[in-house]
Amino acid sequence: MAVPKRKTSKARRDKRRANWKLSIPGFVACPKCGEPIMGHRVCKACGTYNGKEVIKQEA
């Protein structure tokens, strides 16, 4: 099995991991009420998904 000849320094190791950052989730506007929601999720403000009322909202 291959064995490293030299120890990988912390700087070299961390440079490799520099691009592991998290990306922000994509928010879209609800087509019914305009609230920002995550895609493919039920709107918490009006309770609709894909143009249909999924959750009954109290007035």
Image (cartoon, rainbow, N blue to C red):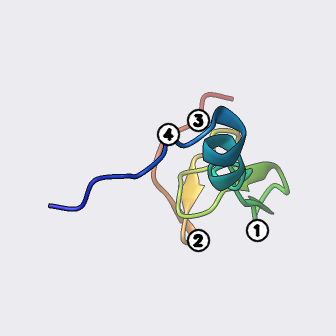
Query: What residue occupies the far left of the structure in this picture?
Result: 1
Instruction: Give the distance between the C-alpha atoms of the residues marked 1 and 4, in whole angstroms.
Output: 55 Å
* Secondary element at tag 1: loop
Residue 13 found in image quarter: top right
Instruction: Give the distance between the C-alpha atoms of the residues marked 4 and 3, in whole angstroms.
Output: 60 Å
Q: Which residue does the image show at 64% across and 54% down from the upper left?
A: 16
* Secondary element at tag 4: loop
Q: Which residue does the image show at 71% across and 50% down from the upper left?
A: 15
Within 10 Å of the Cα at label 1, are there few (<14), some (14-19), or many (20+) other Cα atoms? few
**Callouts 1 and 2 close, C-beta under 8 Å:** yes
- Of residues 10 and 16, the one nearer the viewer is 10
Q: Amino acid at mark 1?
A: Pro
Q: Does label 1 or label 2 sit earlier along the sequence?
A: 1
Instruction: Give the distance between the C-alpha atoms of the residues marked 2 and 4, in whole angstroms.
Output: 58 Å
Q: Which residue does the image show at 23% across and 61% down from the upper left?
A: 2
26 left or right of 56 in image: right
Instruction: Give the distance between the C-alpha atoms of the residues marked 3 and 1, in whole angstroms.
Output: 17 Å
Within 10 Å of the Cα at label 3, are there few (<14), some (14-19), or many (20+) other Cα atoms? few
| Residue occupied by mark 3 | 57
* Secondary element at tag 2: loop
| Residue occupied by mark 2 | 51
**Which tag is nearer the camera, tag 1 or tag 4?**
4
**Which tag is nearer the camera, tag 2 or tag 4?**
4
| Residue occupied by mark 4 | 7
Label placed on residue 31: 1
- Of residues 12 and 59, the one nearer the viewer is 12
**Which tag is nearer the camera, tag 3 or tag 2?**
2
